[in-house]
Image (spheres, helix red, strand yellow):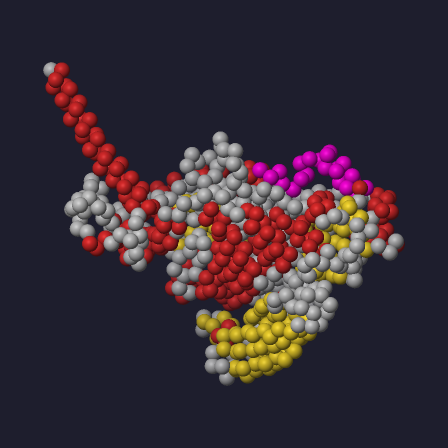
Amino acid sequence: MKKIIKNIVKILLLIIVIVSISVGGGLLYLKANLLDFDKNFDTNQYEIIELNINGYKFLDRNGNKQLDIYEDDRKPIELRVSDLLSKLTKEEKVRMLKGSGMSSGIGMSPHGIPGAVGTIVSTSRLGIPEIYLSDGPAGLRILSTRENDKKKYYCTAFPIATLLASSWDKDLVQNVGFAMGNEALSYGIDVILGPGVNIHRHPLCGRNFEYYSEDPFLTGHIGAAMINGIESNGVGTSPKHFVANNQETSRNINDAIVSERAFREIYLKGFEIIVKKSQPWTIMTSYNKINGTYAPENKRLLTDVLKNEWGFDGVVMTDWFGGKSATAIINAGNDLIEPGTKNSWNELKKSAEDGSLPLINIDASVKRILELIFKSRKMQNYKYDDNPDLKNHAIISGKAAAEGMILLKNNETLPMNNLVNIALIGATSYDFISGGTGSGDVDEAYTVALDQALKDKGFILNKIALNHYEKKIQNNPNKKQKGGGAIETAMTIMNPPIPMDLEYPIELIEKTSKTADIAIVTIGRNSGETADRKVEGDFLLSKTEKEMILSTCKVYHSLGKKVVVILNIGGVIETASWKDLPDAILLAWQGGQEGGNSVVDILTGKINPSGKLPMTFPNDINDHKSSLNFPMDGEQLNLSDVISGLISEEKAEEEKIKNKDYTLYKEGIYVGYRHFDKNNIEVSYPFGYGLSYTDFEYSDLKIIKKTDTIMMSLNVKNIGNQKGKEIVQVYVSKNNSKIDRPLKELKEFSKTKLLDLGETIKMNFNIPIYDLSYWNEEFNDWSLEKGDYSILIGASSRDIKLNQEIDIK
Ligand code: BGC
């Protein structure tokens, strides 16, 4: 009996061993195949003899490796994808349509990369790895700390998107993108959830800092450069949010009511340029509805326009918890639901069974997802080392910041020479803001503030001003912009910090002026996801800030000393009422972790400022036509609106609240300078404006018209006494147009190299004639007007240097 039992046990053990070898060993072997196989291995020479229990073949007669088509990286991706598609079960395919949830995003997942917010699920049976998705526009956003791990996983805080666009320098932005993508590669992240490319429809949108410009041409070309830079690492991007996500107030339910023309010419245009110039791996849809349909459920936009008309061949993914019906989302052509919830899984499974989610749609989306997986470095056995070149990336970040800062005013004050004692006024001087909050934030190792940067360059900080700040901060430790920790950073999503309003009694300023040679006043602003900005105390300077500028100017000017204002802000503020007071104004934006150093490089003249405005600074917020239809009260997003499933039930028409439940884009195409120019409205600083320490002369415009292209050249000469770079802008205007059109529109731009004193450079531009067309709502297509056009070469939208007419037949 004992013997029989022993034998049964032996047989059972043998079965277990055989099964585990064939399942586990098979999987391990397959995984090894996918992640580590010999590139010179020719599968065609091998004959398949063995099927393991999963139906996959591993060995030839001699026990050598045997690959399936999809495993063979010498085969074209389409072939590998169709092979794999034929091997996936329907359930496995449906699984791929949604991510694996949010757990890794808040660092709670036992596997994964803490801080990564989403995934494309793995199919381990076939050795298909998990793909990681992580924010965001100003640098990679993962957590710097991990449980039971002393190592810090910091990322570089690059300058905010608005600053990068202010450089008008595609090569520079591509370099920043390369560094950012390289960081993602080092940390094992496969897709960066950025750049943000929504249009600055209104200055108060809380996420404008994540976006580039009020102009779609600038947005599209800067965005494409960023994407090309990131993706050259074999890391994907996700330009977002497609489309018309121009306010944070009620963003999850807001219905953007937009004309087709405004869509085509303004809101879609940037995305269209991006798709054509950089074919990103993915695109993220927005939360809002568009003319009644949630963006991720909008088949016309996703399938007809984005995929069929523009030829986008990547993956469309939802914003986090965006959209309502998982079935409608996939059927519309939104291929991937992020981060994925149990509800979406249950719904997809059911609709795949009952046919309301047809297999043809499932296959179409899975095919795109598989193509992404095959393109990823993860499929190519890339071994990430968690060791990005943070030192070098900090240098790139600092250089980029200096290139995008904009000199708004300079009365023979800057660069400042031989000044040693500086009174730094304003809390943000000592607590510089590197970037905005929310998913556009970065968990960086440090931020160089202005005080630190000045000290490092040998300047003496005025003690009285310094003590005033330090005393206040001691009593108010929580007023610091960022605690630094990633959890704190995450918390700011729902509660962005407001820069401290530090009071400066005039007696105190007088005391500082006794020893200081110059005063630098910093105005700080911060905003981020989930709330729009307000007019009072945000767009407008607070009473304390106004008094701070006023009294500093009064005291310092009475002694013949200068005052410089630094704007450490993420979005447009009011400048018209106070800009006459200081001697110089530098718009430093939020310059990433090296921001303070970049400001000092400009103040001292080490770098000659060359940034120009990617949007208009109006005299009055209400001068923007969109102010009539924008939520001006900066209301914080309702948490229950953020997560799908909790989206409030549809309201009856009469209950709907303007600018929350819906927003009428009544200004149509008249956004930014298109509106200010058309209506001849004075502005504080126009689109494209920015000063330099030198001057440039424009000459010799030559235009040749070819069948499809307008080719032009002109000369730019440095006629001042500092080396410098100039941003040349090409606008086109239709003369005597029969239709309602903007007075002029940006159609080309370029930044010169650093020009020596007296140096001239020839700039060449080509504009496809097709780009002069407008969206004709009657024909529902682009139309080109015949007749005279003016080519306007400008140093800004309101400083046209050269002008020539051409005739389009
Ligand atoms: C934001 C996206 C972001 C996503 C993941 C959303 O709340 O709107 O821009 O990529 O979260 O963090």
Left or right of 41 in this view: 594: right
- Vertical order, 788 against 556 (above or below): below
Q: Position of residue 495 (x, y in %)?
A: 60, 41
Q: Residue furthest right?
A: 558
> Magenta stretch?
464-485
State left or right for residue 65 relative to residue 257: left
Q: Within the magenta stretch, is there residue 474?
A: yes
> Which x, y percent locates residue 248?
56, 50
Magenta-drawn stretch contains 151: no
Residue 429 visible in the snapshot: no
**What secondary structure do most residues of the magenta stretch adopt?**
helix
Q: Observer-nearest residue: 458 or 305? A: 458
Camera-nearest residue between 627 and 56: 56
**Could you tell me residue 742's position as x and y percent?**
59, 71
Q: Residue at x 56, y 60 (%)?
A: 172
For image coordinates 83% across by 45% down, the residue present is: 512
Quadrant housing the N terminus: top left
The residue shown at (45%, 46%) is: 189
Q: Kindly identify the residue that appears in the image at 56 percent across and 71 percent down.
A: 747
Residue 731, quarter of the rendered image: bottom right
In the image, is residue 433 above or below residue 201? above
